[in-house]
Amino acid sequence: MSRKVSYRFDALKALPAALVFAPRDTIDRQMRAAEALMESVEGAREYPIDFALYRVTGFRPVQPSDRTALGRELVHDLSAIVLDLSLRLKLNGSEREGGALTPEQAARELAVSFKTMQRLREDGLCAHWVEVDGAVRVRMYRECIARFVARHKPRVQAASRFRRFSGDESRILQSEANALMEAGHSLNSAAALLAAKHGRSHEGVRLLLMRHFGRTNSAHSRKVERASKFAERAYRFGVDLTKIAHRLGRSESLVRSVVDQRRAMRLRGAQLPFVELPTFELFGAHETILAPPCVREGLMSSLQDDDAIALLESARLARRGRAFARETQARRAAQDARAAAMHFLVRRSKRALSGSVRRPTRALLDGIETDLRWAALLRRSLVASAMTIASGRIDQFFAGEPEKLRVDELRALLRALRDRLVAVVAQYDPSRQDLEALAGLEADFVLAHFDAQRSRRAASKLALSEGTTMDPLLDAAAPWQSEVDRLWRKRDGVKLLPPASRALLLARYGWQGSAPLTLVELAKSMRTSVAMATRNLYLAENSLRRVTV
């Protein structure tokens, strides 16, 4: 039984489905066109999706798209197309000259390892589903292998010459490396010397020594790691990069590169869930989805989320407003638009992070962080809207007097409700669900379990304070917000700053409820250069840190 292949682009995924009733000759022609294209694609280049569709089908799309794909991503989907179409053709392996081989047989013929064969498939060596004794198996035609080897001959020859270190050779290299490192060489420089001496690759010797000595065994490695962490931490506290570089005795460009690299690494490790909507692949989706005024303005909620009683009162005040009942349809349309924009921004950020090189550019990283700030504001506004609806169920459950609960019980109830609503918003699909209905159901669930958990909450370790203040509930709406907006908790201090600094910070981070701006957009709005806008922003951020210490 064949396994279902996966795709990364819906436009390419739709190709096999469009050929359900096509004649065998058409299917075979498009499969061979996909093979030819994947063998010519370069992994590091970008290709338009429309170009790939035209090369495979011979037709240009009715609705043009500006979507592009990296070569390695395109090869992945073209390989999936070849597998899908070969399954339709019910191949037996004798259709082409030389027949078909198993991946293991192909590896032996090329004198490479099976793992190398998997890497070659990722670079364009195509495989097919072939029926063998009534079962479908992956096979590789000799014809396809010959074409691939002709195009990638140096790489295949280098892989065939590879040999593992023998036990004696490993011990000799480790002993000589130990003597070199005791003499003051770093692990990397020792590997370079030994590679030249023994006729092995620098990378192979380096990896052998790293396995033997460990990554942190080198004093130089530990020093570099400490300096990198120090530079990133100082940057997050607002220290000028020039001062950091002077302190470390390195160039400013190197320190900036290290800081940007660690920022990207932290973002890649963040949890960034989103829902894939069918409109994301349409032409001009980024302009249409992010254009509505409700997506760009009014993103700050009026809920007083740092005080339990004040939160309930502000939610009641919002529900009692005439516009709340009169504009139900418009409010729900705005919630759907914000949800779609939130998922789109998170998706765009994740794709930019996964597609970026190891050292991303400042402009790319700034765009990713700005998208995530915007997505955090949208997600926060959706959680606030859901909390407003859910608070009505709380009033109904307690006959309009939830304030009579113990303070720690009320806080625990609101926290439990917040956690449920955050999970709902993270997976909310505006094309199939209604946010307010979901909020009501989640509130009913939390309240139904309230009495059973009441005694445990009362006996919990939460201290009973004199007031009802608590950590802001909505700050947990977007867990990644602390990574991209380091001054979020200090935003109330902008009213103490001069008007120019206040306007700069509000526009940059979106604290007034509008979409945040990238450095390029900020410089354009100020009618100045990016360097000057960056400098003014740095001064404004430091002023905010001083007034809110």
Image (cartoon, rainbow, N blue to C red):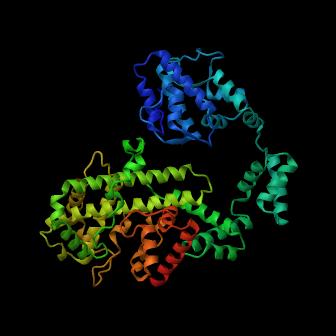
Identify the image quadrant of residue 307.
bottom left
The residue under the point 52% across, 23% down is: 30
Residue 335 visible in the picture: yes
196 vs 341, left or right, is: right
Residue 93 in the image: state x and y as whole percent: 58, 17
The residue under the point 65% across, 77% down is: 243
Residue 421 in the image: state x and y as whole percent: 30, 60
88 vs 166, left or right, is: left
Residue 424 in the image: state x and y as whole percent: 31, 55
236 vs 250, left or right, is: left
- Give the camera-side residue of 193 and 329: 329
- Give the camera-side residue of 305 and 194: 305
The residue under the point 58% across, 68% down is: 531
Q: Is residue 379 above or below residue 53?
A: below
**Extreme residue in the front direction:** 527
Q: Is residue 18 above or below residue 423?
A: above
**Extreme residue in the right direction:** 197
- Give the camera-side residue of 197 and 62: 62
Identify the image quadrant of residue 399.
bottom left
Residue 448 in the image: state x and y as whole percent: 20, 60
